Each structure stands twice: as C-alpha cells, then as structure tokens.
C-alpha cells in the first residue's frame, strides 16, 4: 500500500504543499518517496529511498502550481531510487504516482518496449505513463488518453497523473482509495487519505471505483472511467480535525492511540439503538452469519465468535478474509457477511465482500474510516467512532471493534442495555487503569524482556484470540518472535519450546475457564518458564502480574491493553519506531 497526493491551483507553493501533505500519509508506506513538480513546460522529478519524514520540505519552495508526490510500500520491484515514484513517460511530459498493483503490467511493458519505449525501473507502475504517452499519439487530449490507458489496466489502482502540455491533473481509482479536497480559493488536493490536505480544507469528494477526474486547478470534472460520461458529484464536509491526526504530547501515535482507549470504548458503544436492533434482527433472520477480516480485526471477529456463543448461543462462522473465498459454497441470498476493518480499504476484505454480493448475501461493515471503500460498498455500516488510527499497529480500533460486536451479541440476546452498561463500565475502568503509574510498571517489565528473542502467549475462550493478537502486536513493532496459543494446545506440541526463563504471558479472567488456564501455566512453570500473568487476580504461579479490571464477558477488551503497552515499550526499548515498523503498512490494499 502507498500514499499518493497531488495539488493543482492558484497557489505557487505546490511543492511544499505536497511534500508536507505526503508526510501525513507516511503510515501508508515508507520505504521510499518522490515528487514531480510542473515548472513551465518541464516536469522536475526528485525521488529517493528512505522515509519522507526525513526530507526537508523547505527544499521544495520553487514557484510551482501543480505537483504530485508519493510515499511507497514496495510491491513490484525492490526498494531502490529508480523504483520510487513518480514515474515518467519517455518524453518526460507525463508523471504518474500510483497505489495498487497492475496485474497485466508484464504484457503491457512488452508491447510498449516493442514500440520503442525504454523502462528505467522494474515496477508495475512505470507502464502507466508510457501507456498514456502512446494513447496521446492517437488523440492528444490528455484526459481521454488517460481514460483509454486506464481501461487497459487490470488490477487495483489509484492513479494520479500530471501532464505539462495540458496543464491538468487527472486521476482514477479502481479498488484503492482516492479523495479530493476542495478549497475554493486555492484549488484541488487529491490524496489517498484526508490527513494529506486537512490543513487546507475539510470539504471533500470521495472518488468511487470506476470513476476518474480532470482538473486544471480552477474547476473539476468527474466522469465514468468506462464511458467517459461526466456526472455531477456532491461534496461532503468532514468533521475530523487536524489535532486528531497529530501526535499531540505523545512520542508516537501508537501510545497516543492506546491512551485514547480511555474514551474510545464509550464512543464505540454510543450507537443508534434502532440501527443496532436492525442488525441484530438481520443476524437472527440470516441463514448463516459469517465474519471476515484480516490481522487484528480478524482477532476481534474470533473473540466475537465466543461472545455470540456465550452471550446469546448464536452460531457465527469466522474466517480470515484472505481465506473466505473457499467458503462461498455456504453463501446464499439469505446469508449475512459481517466484515470488520479499521481502514475500510483492505483488499482481502473487499474481495470477501464481492464474493458475498455475487451470492446475493447482504454485507454489514464495521469500520473506523468513514467514507472508505468498504464503508461505501456495504449494505449497512457501523462506525466504531475511534477517530483516526495512524499507527500501523492497530490498538484502539481492536477494542472498539470488540465492543461493537459484543453490543450486537447482547442486543441479539434482547439485552442491549445490559450490554451497553457492561461496556460503559469497562470503558470507565480502562480509563482508571490507563494512568502514568501503570505505564511505568509495564515499561519496567519491558526493560527486563527487551533482550528476549522469543516469547509465548496463552489464552482460553475469548482470551485465545487475544493471545494471537498479543503475538501480532509484539511481533510487528518489536520484531521479537512472539507466538500465541490456545492454552489447551500447549501439551500437543508447543510446550517443547519452553526452556529456562522463557517468557510466557498468560491471559486470564475470573470465570469458568480460569482454573484450566492456571493449570496450563503451572505446566509451563514446571518447565522453567517465566510466567507473566494478565488478569483481575494474582495467582501463585505468576512471577509477574499485570492487573486488569474484572469485567466478565468483556475481559478480552481489558486484557489486551497491557499487552499493547508492553509491545510499545518493547519496541522503544529495542530502538525501533513503533509507528513505522519495517515491512508493514497501515492498510493492506493489495492482495
Ligand atoms: C494490526 O496491528 C495490523 N496493522 C494489521 O494486522 C491490520 O489489523 C490488518 O491489516 C487489517 O487492517 P484493517 O483493519 O484496516 O482492515
């Protein structure tokens, strides 16, 4: 996944606008960066490997009224300067930035090479400017040449292209996000996500799949990519503020977003009750309810499987969205698919939605990013209202997702207000728990663990998905090899991994399975493990104990929070940047 951003309009500091703006999209990919500025009849390109946050914006103050920029997460082609975007046509009159994957790029490249085009990179993207250049030989109009070129592309893309001859910017999207910021007195901002231009405007147009736009900076046209037919497009006012997208007093977004859980549980629970009841009825009446998501969001769905079983004895089927394709045999028009996604742009989740829709099933989306593709393509949507989540490691979104799913389970059981009360009380206890002393306690624990290369996490019931989620958190920001297990599975193999002082985190509640998991912890201890308990009560087997409130069925929501904090401090203690972990990106918009 990558970040793209362009500006065109009356201002003459387009270079600094797009460099500053693309820095706010760094979470989308950060292995290399680039900018193309239109200077008269020339396009000036600068690009390099490394993080855009290390680039001095002041270097781009040249007089310029149109520019595009890119921050990359490499898919096709390694991390090199030549593979960084923008990419240009042979005559250097066209520059392109792209987010997505052009699946037929090899055939297109071969055909273009046979026509004399020379390629400098080994990316899929580079075929785009050359294809437009070739189409302009048929008709020089940039927008129609761009449209014809896009129709030859297969795959997912958000493309932004600039041309010195026409003096316009064109863009199109198919499967990857693109949003237009409109500032009447300044011009147009076109970006993968809103933080790129939030300093200039909160009036936006969301580009839909199969749509394109053309703008010369003083006006803008939207059209259907297939037919080229223009159509009007309503804009909307967004409420997100600049502050919400900045770090504030925190060193990293990850810690800021962990701490925001002091109020995000309550915000997640603050749903339209009529809408929640409608969704609960849809689940009750569906012939098969499926939950699909990726990564952390998938662990929220796994926890929900226990919520629906224990709270309302209703069977739901959970799948990783990337695996959902093989379950289409079970889907029928009366089925219901619930997808959960923080970004609302995850490719595998979008594919699961399309599979369900092909079978006539209805789709409910639980998202955080309103206006995202998943939000707009679902039949109905619930927002977790967590506010922007910028850190690659998902934290407040997870607990918000679990809160919404638990509220739906309680509503299905006819106990909406009981569930709302439990979750609001849980949020209030988390608010008390997240205090400076608690952070210091966990930071001290991280200091004792920072040299470890392996650690294991066990859980039972809804704490089993949290054991898997704990592993994701620790892996992705500290690079420690962490693995989560269902506690009962230890004796069937993994316990062979335990050596003297192997750190083992044990996630417990105060419920019917506590005795079982404490016994599992004793078995680990007997083989030399260092037992770090996370739960409402201390047990003799614990060498360390991270106390959390006792909140019954909501225990999973509490238990994961000290692990999030531990993962954060492990990363910091190991000299890593928890906001921008290696090899990862915030939203995986490619399959
Ligand atoms: C979680 O910390 C990771 N960043 C990743 O697993 C993430 O949860 C997954 O890619 C799903 O993203 P989404 O919620 O935006 O769909």
Image (tube, grey):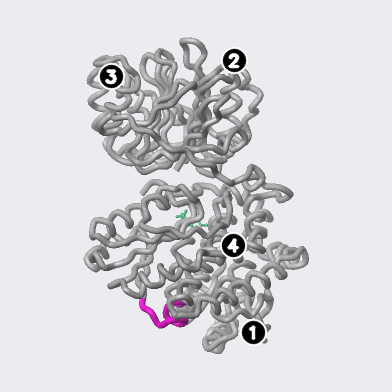
How much space separates mark 4 and mark 2, taking CA atoms? 45 Å
In terms of sequence position, does the residue under pointer 1 or pointer 2 come before the other?
A: 2
In terms of sequence position, does the residue under pointer 3 or pointer 2 come before the other?
A: 2
Verify whether residue 313 appears in magenta. Answer: yes
Q: Position of residue 499 (x, y in %)?
A: 56, 74
Q: Can the viewer see residue 294? A: no
Q: Position of residue 329 (x, y in %)?
A: 22, 66
At numbered mark 4, what does the secondary structure look like: helix, strand or loop? helix
Q: Closer to the camera: disc 3 or disc 2?
A: 2
Q: Which residues are magenta?
A: 306-315
How much space separates mark 1 and mark 3, taking CA atoms? 71 Å
Mark 1 = which residue?
Answer: 541
Residue 201 lies, with reference to residue 570, above or below; the image says above
Per the rendering, the mark at residue 63 is 2
Q: Does the magenta stretch mainly form a helix, a strand or a loop?
A: helix
Q: Can the viewer see residue 283? A: yes
Q: Residues within 10 Å of mark 3 (few under 14, many from 20)?
A: many
Pick the residue in front: 577 or 318: 318
In terms of sequence position, does the residue under pointer 1 or pointer 4 come before the other?
A: 4
Mark 3 = which residue?
Answer: 134
- Apparent side of residue 480 relative to residue 4 in the rendered image (left or right): right
Q: Closer to the camera: disc 1 or disc 3?
A: 3
In terms of sequence position, does the residue under pointer 1 or pointer 3 come before the other?
A: 3
- Apparent side of residue 472 relative to residue 252 in the rendered image (left or right): left
In terms of sequence position, does the residue under pointer 4 or pointer 2 come before the other?
A: 2
């Amino acid at each position: 996944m990558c970040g793209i951003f362009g500006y065109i309009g009356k201002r003459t500091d387009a270079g600094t606008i797009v460099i500053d703006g693309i820095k706010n999209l760094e979470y989308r990919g950060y292995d290399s960066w680039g900018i193309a500025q239109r200077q008269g009849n020339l396009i000036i390109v600068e690009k390099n490997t490394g993080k855009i946050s290390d680039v001095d914006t002041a270097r781009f103050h040249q007089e310029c009224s149109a520019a595009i920029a890119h921050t990359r997460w490499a898919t096709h082609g390694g991390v090199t300067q030549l593979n960084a975007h923008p990419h240009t046509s042979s005559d250097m009159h066209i520059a392109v930035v792209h987010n997505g994957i052009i699946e037929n790029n090899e055939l297109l490249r071969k055909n273009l090479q046979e026509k004399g085009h020379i390629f400098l990179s080994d990316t899929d993207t580079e075929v785009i400017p050359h294809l437009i250049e070739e189409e302009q030989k048929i008709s020089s109009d940039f927008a129609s040449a761009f449209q014809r070129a896009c129709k030859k592309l297969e795959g997912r893309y958000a493309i932004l292209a600039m041309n010195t001859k026409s003096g316009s910017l064109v863009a199109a999207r198919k499967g990857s996000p693109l949003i237009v910021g409109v500032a009447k007195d300044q011009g147009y901002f076109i970006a993968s996500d809103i933080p790129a231009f939030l300093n200039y405007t909160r009036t936006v147009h969301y580009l839909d799949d199969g749509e394109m736009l053309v703008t010369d900076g003083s006006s803008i046209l939207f059209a259907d990519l297939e037919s080229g037919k223009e159509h009007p497009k309503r804009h909307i006012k967004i409420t997100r503020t600049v502050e919400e997208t900045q770090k504030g007093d925190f060193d990293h977004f990850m810690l800021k977003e962990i701490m925001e859980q002091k109020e995000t549980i309550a915000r997640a629970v603050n749903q339209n009750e009529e809408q929640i009841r409608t969704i609960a009825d849809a689940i009750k009446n569906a012939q098969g309810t499926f939950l699909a998501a990726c990564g952390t969001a998938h662990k929220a769905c796994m926890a929900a499987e226990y919520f629906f079983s224990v709270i309302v004895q209703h069977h739901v089927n959970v799948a990783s969205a990337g695996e959902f394709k093989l379950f289409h045999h079970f889907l029928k028009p009366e089925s219901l698919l619930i997808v959960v996604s923080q970004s609302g742009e995850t490719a595998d989740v979008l594919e699961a939605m399309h599979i369900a829709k092909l079978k006539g099933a209805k789709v409910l989306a639980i998202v955080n990013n309103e206006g995202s593709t998943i939000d707009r393509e679902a039949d109905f949507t619930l927002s977790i209202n967590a506010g922007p989540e910028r850190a690659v490691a998902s934290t407040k979104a997870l607990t918000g997702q679990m809160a919404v799913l638990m509220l739906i389970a309680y509503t299905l059981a006819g106990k909406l207000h009981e569930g709302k009360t439990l979750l609001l009380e849980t949020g209030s206890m988390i608010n008390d728990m997240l205090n400076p002393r608690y952070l210091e306690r966990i930071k001290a624990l991280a200091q004792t663990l920072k040299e470890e290369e392996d650690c294991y996490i066990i859980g039972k019931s809804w704490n089993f998905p949290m054991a898997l989620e704990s592993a994701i958190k620790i892996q992705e920001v500290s690079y420690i090899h962490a693995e989560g297990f269902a506690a009962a599975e230890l004796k069937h193999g993994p316990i062979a991994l335990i050596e003297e002082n192997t750190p083992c985190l044990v996630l417990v509640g105060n419920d019917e399975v506590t005795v079982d998991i404490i016994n599992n912890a004793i078995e680990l201890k007997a083989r030399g493990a260092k037992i770090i308990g996370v739960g409402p009560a201390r047990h003799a087997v614990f060498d360390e104990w991270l106390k959390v409130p006792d909140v019954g069925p909501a225990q999973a929501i509490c238990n994961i929070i000290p692990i999030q904090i531990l993962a954060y401090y492990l990363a910091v203690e190991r000299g890593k940047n928890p906001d921008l972990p290696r090899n990862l990106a915030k939203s995986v918009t490619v399959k």
